[in-house]
Amino acid sequence: MALALFASNTLALEPLTGNIFTHDPSTMIKDGSRYYIFFTGQNISSKSSTDKLNWSSGPSVFSNATRPAWTTNAVPGFTGNFWAPDIIQMNGRFYLYYSVSTFGSQVSAIGLATNATLDPSSPDYHWTDQGPVIQSNSGVNYNTIDPSVMLASDGRMWMSFGSYWTGIKLIELDPATGKRISGNSPVYSLATHPPSTAIEGSCLIQHDDYYYLFVNWDMCCSGIDSTYNIRVGRSASVTGPYLDRNGLNMTFGGGTMFLESSGRYIGPGHAGVMVEGETNWLTFHYYDGNANGASKLALGRLQWTSDGWPVITNDWTAFYPFEADARDDSRQYNGQLVNGATVVDETNRSKVLNLDGANNFVLLPISVANADTFAAWVKWNGGDAWQRIFDFGDGTSRYFFLTPSNGQNGKLRFAINAGSGEKTIDGDGPLPIGAWQHVAVTLDGSRGLLYLNGNPIATNANLTIRPWQILARSNYLGESQFSADPLFNGQLDSFRVFGRALSADEIKEIAFAHPSLSHRYSFTTDASDSIGMAHGTLSGNATVTNNALVLTGVPGGYVNLPGGLVSGSSAATIEFWASFGANGNWARVFDFGNISGNNGQNFYFFSLHTSANGLRLGASTASGTVNFDLPGTFDYQKLHVVCVTDPSSGYTAIYTNGVLLASQTVALPALTGVSAAWSFIGRSLFSSDAWLNATIDEFRIYDGRLTPDEIAANDLAGPDALTIPVQITASNSPDGLTLRWPAYAAGFVLESANSLNSDAIWNPVLSEPILENDAYEVTLPASATAQFFRLIR
């Protein structure tokens, strides 16, 4: 059976490989079995791909010898660096539009070249220049670059264009020739960006009953300092007016934010949309914050809201579990421990980051500041005001930070300043001292929310500053942009950053989750990851039914997850609840690694049915191969299974239903050697192995090693519930009965009942707990009747 493999990543963008260095890409177009784009470059550059994923360079459209002579006559100083092409197919030919200009000049032109094919190996391949379509000079109020062409459903053809000056314009083209319909046809004004003139890179498309106009605001071409962002509006008429979602006319500066800097994807620009069947493919360029601002091609699936607006999901996360150092779980945004910052053991918390308040801090990469949610588990030792949990910025006028106590009113504060004044959100008081607390901040472009232990505690309803606008260059945990401020004195147990503003329910989920939980697949409707944003796709006959993943063992049915889910981990715990059917040899619950020919390579997997009728948790990398084999299979069993691999101690273990099944201690290869190419549920990297026959209720990955108590607590709670081991202690005194439980038990409520019978009625204890010495404490009056207490959430 032939299978096509398509990897995915933590963004809703395709994981492009090959030569993807690109600026101002055209709309993607297909000819035969290949996809093509054209982009800014000497004599017009091109790339092609057979699968839209791996791209290779193609020939330039022109050579120095075939470059149209009219271009240098029309634009003095032009040396052959053509800008921002666009392409369309009609009349059995390909029509390529291109810009001729020099930087900062209004003396520009848009030209047209045609070809019967885009395949350079074809004998029919030949670009014929058709001359200029429209030109501009100081005598007009527009600039003729950045063409976007569209053939409307009524057969009429249009081109939007424009850069700076008076904004985006529109002219009608003749679909028979591709040229301007007449020399004096109307020039329509579509969009401006007052008071700035920085608007360009338009894209005009038709979808259902509307025409949509995408435009770029602000500045390109400055690498990581680029501020390009894509706005959108729509109109029932191709000539406008184009209104944004708030009804603002784009002619007067309207435009709904569509795509902005996020993570490593800085300054997205020059959108193009290719419709292929039911899929709308969006292409654009961005400046890669993890590659010194190199301009690269991006490709994603454009979606449409129920009320007809285009959106593209931008789910990504950086996760710092602090299990060994300051690495990001995905290895995309690794940090550095500075001045002796250390990872230490903490009772009931596994590993945590320790900062001494004198010298220690963590430095994070610049891209991680381009986000909308920031969350952490924090234990503050107290001290002077203005310590920083985090502070991302570029000096003392551009920053955003979270402090446990500000020096003005002593409260927990989030503040952000893009250079024109500080906006703040204050909590009710300072962060409690000496107690684990979960803090989070979300910014959605219109307001900011501050959370404590999963609950919103304060808001600023007029907070429109975007974190990417800070252009942060110094991103700290525990350090301040202000040299006079004290360093943070305390501990952090996981720091999470998300590319979008999480909802209140999502914040509560990460506050309630184990700090090391990196990925969670609950299979409520699909293979989404509610914690780590590493969303998977269902392949073949894999389905989600009754909140569970159903795999039948038929070849082709599996879940394709993003690669590298454990490749950044010092230790890993894989947990799942499953009902197994009859399985063939080497059926995999999970398999992470690479494929070489028909075999797996540099992998980590668990098989519930080996060829020896046993179990195997195995790892094989360039550093060696170690297998943990046990007799018996899991066929026809319903089990909660936990697989633990800790190379630092050589420990491997398998638990079933909360109880240790077996363990071994031998030297293990580091998980960093596991290839980040593929991650499967229900499929092997080896083509000859069986496919999984099972129903999986929930699948989790932890960056770290769960303890036996944590595993037992998860088993007791079952799937679809997040818990941690929490114990109530009781002591009697003359004042009454005192009950205590750990401060890290976010969201737990104390309840009481008069019996433990099945019909017992549990009621909340109304006394407000007091936080003291890293624990919540309630003292209740002595009672002559028996009472029972529990914590529940």
Image: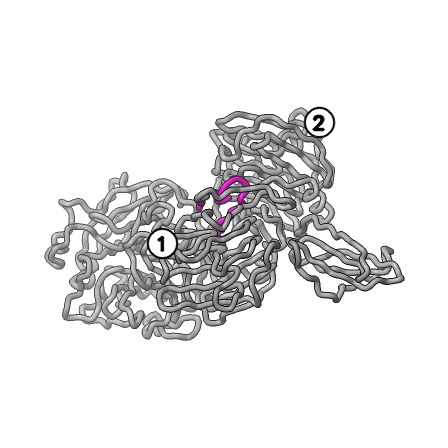
Q: In which quarter of the image is the C terminus?
A: bottom right
Using the image, determine if residue 600 lies above or below residue 127: above
Q: Which residue is drawn at 12% across and 52% down?
A: 69
Instruction: Pinpoint residue 528: horizontal percent, then vertical percent.
Output: 56, 51
Return the disc, 1 or 2, that comes first in the chain's sequence.
Answer: 1
Give x and y (percent) for residue 377: 57, 53
Q: Where is residue 185 in the image (x, y as percent from the top left)?
A: 22, 71
> Which region is colored magenta?
316-335
Under mark 1, the amino acid is: Phe
Q: Which of 76 and 710 is in front in this view?
A: 710
Instruction: Give the residue furthest to the right.
Output: 784
Q: In the image, is 625 to the left or to the right of 711?
A: left
Question: Does residue 260 appear anywhere in the picture?
Answer: no
Quickly name the residue at label 2: 631
Q: Which residue is drawn at 35% across and 65% down?
A: 419
Q: Which circle marks residue 705 in the picture?
A: none
Task: Find numbered disc 1 in the image and state the secondary structure of the residue it sits on.
Answer: strand
Up the image or down, 596 lies above or below 493; here it is above
Labels 1, 2: front one: 2
